[in-house]
Amino acid sequence: MELNQPWWIDVIKAFIVVNLVLGAFAYLTWTERKVLGRMQNRYGPNRAGPFGLLQPIADLVKLLRKASFEPAAGIDILYYAAPVVAGFTALAAFSVIPFGGVWHWGSYDVTGWVVNVSIGLILLFSLSAIGIYAFVVGGWASESKYSLLGAMRTCAQLVSYEVSLGLSVLGVVIMGQSLSLVDIAEKQQATMWFVIPQFVGFIVFFISGIAETNRAPFDLPEAEQELVAGYHTEYSGMRWTLPRYRYDQLMNFGWKVLLPVAVVNLIVTGAIVLYFGF
C-alpha cells in the first residue's frame, strides 16, 4: 500500500518517540526509587515538587551543573564517545517498534512506527549488540584496571543473556513468519497475541531483558560491594541494597537454565507450526 507520508512526519514521530521514552524512563526511575524507599523503610524522593514528582527534573539540572572530571590517563575521544553510543543504540531501538496502525490526517498518512524494515527484529538485536561495545570501550578508555575488569564481566553477562534473548523470540518469528515487527504485530491482530502460545518464550525474554538492562537481581555492574560499581567506576551510577546473584550463579543461570529452556521452546514451536500450521 502506497502511503503519502513525507520525511518530515518521520522526523516529528522520531522526536516524539525519543522524548516519550526519556520521560517514561525518568518517571519509572522515580517510581522505582519510591518503591525501594518504602522497602527500606524510608520515603524516597519527596522534596522536589508535590510527592517528589519534580525529582527527575532536579536530577537532570544537578547532572548538568556538576563539575566535569576525567581520568588523567584516559583516552578523551573514546571516554566521551562510549556513553553517547550506549544512549544512541538504546533510543534507536525504539524506531522499529510499532505503536499503532495508520492514521489519515488531511491529505497525509501517518504510520504508527518511525521506520518499517523487513529485518526489524535483526536490526533491534544488532543495535543491542553495538551497545555492548560501548561498555567495553567505556571500561578500557578510562585506563583503569578495575573499570576494565568490570566492563569485561558486564560484557560476559550481556553476551550470555543475549543468546537466550534472541532464541526466545524465534518462536514469535516462526509464528509471525516475518522478521518485521510491523508484520508480526499485524499477524497478532489477525490471530491472537503471541504471548499466549509463547508464554515460556515470554518468561525467558522477560528474565533475559532484566539481565540485559542490569536490573536487580542481575545488577552486578552496579554492585558496589563486589565491583565498586564495575565499569561505572569512572561514571556515576545508581546504588541499591537488594540481594543479587553471585557472578557464578549469574552465568550458570543464563547458560544452564534460560538457554536450554529457550532452545526447547523453539523446537516445540517449530514442530507444532510444521505439523499443525498456524
Image (cartoon, rainbow, N blue to C red):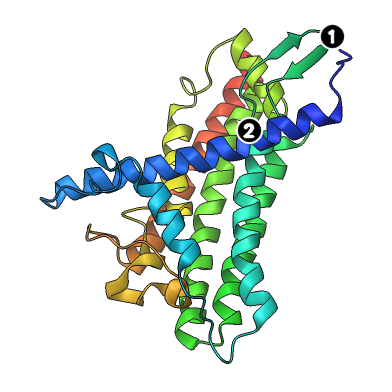
**Quadrant of residue 81 in the image?**
bottom right
Mark 2: amino acid: Ile
The earlier-in-sequence mark between 2 and 1 is 2
Q: Name the residue under label 2.
A: 16
Between residue 15 and residue 130, name the one nearer to us.
Answer: 15
> What residue appears at the point 62 percent right and 34 percent down from the top-left corner?
17
**Quadrant of residue 49 in the image?**
top left
Between residue 22 and residue 66, name the one nearer to us.
Answer: 66
The spot of residue 15 in percent (x, y) is: 67, 37
The answer to whether residue 7 is visible is yes
Image quadrant for the C terminus? Answer: top right
Is 209 left, or right, of 84 in this rendering? left
Q: Name the residue under label 1.
A: 107
**Quadrant of residue 139 in the image?**
bottom right
Spatial CA span between label 2 and label 1:
21 Å
Mark 1: amino acid: Ser
Between residue 152 and residue 36, name the one nearer to us.
Answer: 36
Q: Is mark 1 on a helix, strand or loop?
A: loop
Image quadrant for the N terminus? Answer: top right
The spot of residue 214 in percent (x, y) is: 42, 56
> What residue appears at the point 22 percent right and 61 percent down from the top-left corner?
241
The spot of residue 82 in percent (x, y) is: 62, 68
Mark 2 closeness class: few <14, some 14–19, many ≥20 residues within 10 Å: few
Mark 1 closeness class: few <14, some 14–19, many ≥20 residues within 10 Å: few
> What residue appears at the point 31 percent right and 54 percent down from the top-left corner?
217
Between residue 187 and residue 236, name the one nearer to us.
Answer: 236
> What residue appears at the point 65 percent right and 53 percent down from the top-left corner?
88
The spot of residue 272 in percent (x, y) is: 57, 21
On residue 44, the disc is: none
